[in-house]
Amino acid sequence: MFELPLLRSPLIGPPFAHGFSTRAGGVSAAPFDSLNMGARWGDAAANVEENRRRLLQAVGVAGPLHVVRQVHGAAVARVRAGDDPSAIARIEADALITDDPGVVLGVFVADCIPALIVDPRTGAVAAAHAGWRGMAARVPRSAIAAMNDAFSTRPGDLVAAIGPSIGACCYEVGPDVYDSFAAAGFSAGDLEQWFCRDPQPSAANPSMPLPPRRTDRWFFDGWASLVSQLEAEGIPPPQIFHARLCTASHPDVLPSYRRDGRAAGRIAAAITARRP
């Protein structure tokens, strides 16, 4: 018997089933140890398949798990009951939506932000992968608009959960990132809130030495950006859960591409539409 801990949002309860995984509870060997969900970075396919099976069992759903080919954009894929998971996996997108009960959606991350959205009124759900490129492209807006178009959801009814991802303490970026948000039309106030010149202490390790301040670099607060974008689309602040766990600050339990490179492995966020 295996033990697989999951992070869950207190805002998303039955009849929805969901969870954010950690590194614990899988079968992958180092450097992917142990619950690696990513199949594209060198881990054995059999290990990844078993890890995903364990994730579904821990979430409490039968599966299959539907994922897309994540490309750091804002495209959204709709999944219906009976869709072939291998066909969905070839779609280039960064968010998935469904309202078919029992359909399981998932995204994989190693520093990017996993976001789950549910609509208690209609039973519809979404899973989104939000890196800085996706947030500059407004993937939260795309996912919420797609839910509205397909299922007549209302933003004020939605509940969102933000899982582990890299925090501003560890996410130093260059002018290309700042310029991308500016070019996308975000306000000066947004940029001031999301980009900071001064290194930020890690909440997980406050005594960790701070990197030197560099005038051509910023520390990007992707958490603040995503929350602001969700609120701007109409989700009330009390209906947004934020794990506030930095992947780069917790090497024992979370993978980080920024910290570990391609061998970081991936964690997953999974959600299923409301059951009958």
Image: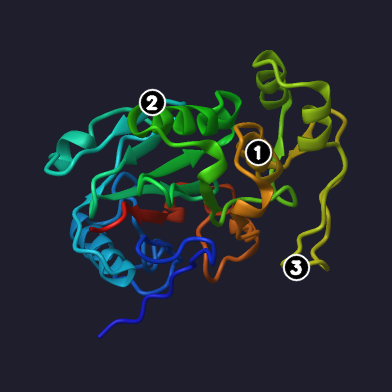
Mark 3 and mark 1: span between their CA atoms? 29 Å
Q: Give the residue pinned by disc 3.
A: 205
Mark 3 and mark 2: span between their CA atoms? 43 Å
Q: Is residue 74 above or below residue 38?
A: above
Q: Three-letter amino acid code at disc 2? A: Asp
The nearer-to-camera label among 3 and 2 is 2
Question: Residue 160: image x %, image y %?
Answer: 53, 49
| Identity of the residue drawn at 77% across and 29% down | 190
Who is closer to the viewer here, 61 or 266? 61
Question: Residue 115: image x %, image y %?
Answer: 50, 47
Q: Residue lying at the far front in this picture: please name it.
A: 121
Q: Is residue 73 above or below residue 54?
A: above
Mark sitting earlier along the chain (3/1): 3
The nearer-to-camera label among 3 and 1 is 1
| Identity of the residue drawn at 38% across and 26% down | 149
Mark 1 and mark 2: span between their CA atoms? 19 Å
Who is closer to the viewer here, 274 or 264? 274
Query: For numbered disc 1, what is the local secondary structure?
Result: helix
Q: Three-letter amino acid code at disc 1? A: Glu
Q: Three-letter amino acid code at disc 3? A: Asn
Q: For label 2, count other residues whose C-alpha is less than 10 Å away and answer few (under 14), some (14-19) or many (20+).
A: few
Q: Give the residue pinned by disc 2.
A: 149
Q: Is residue 252 left or right of residue 266?
A: right
Q: Residue 231, which numbered label? A: 1
Question: Residue 259: image x %, image y %?
Answer: 59, 53
| Identity of the residue drawn at 54% across and 61% down | 11
Q: Is residue 243 above or below residue 75?
A: below
Q: Is residue 151 left or right of residue 116?
A: left
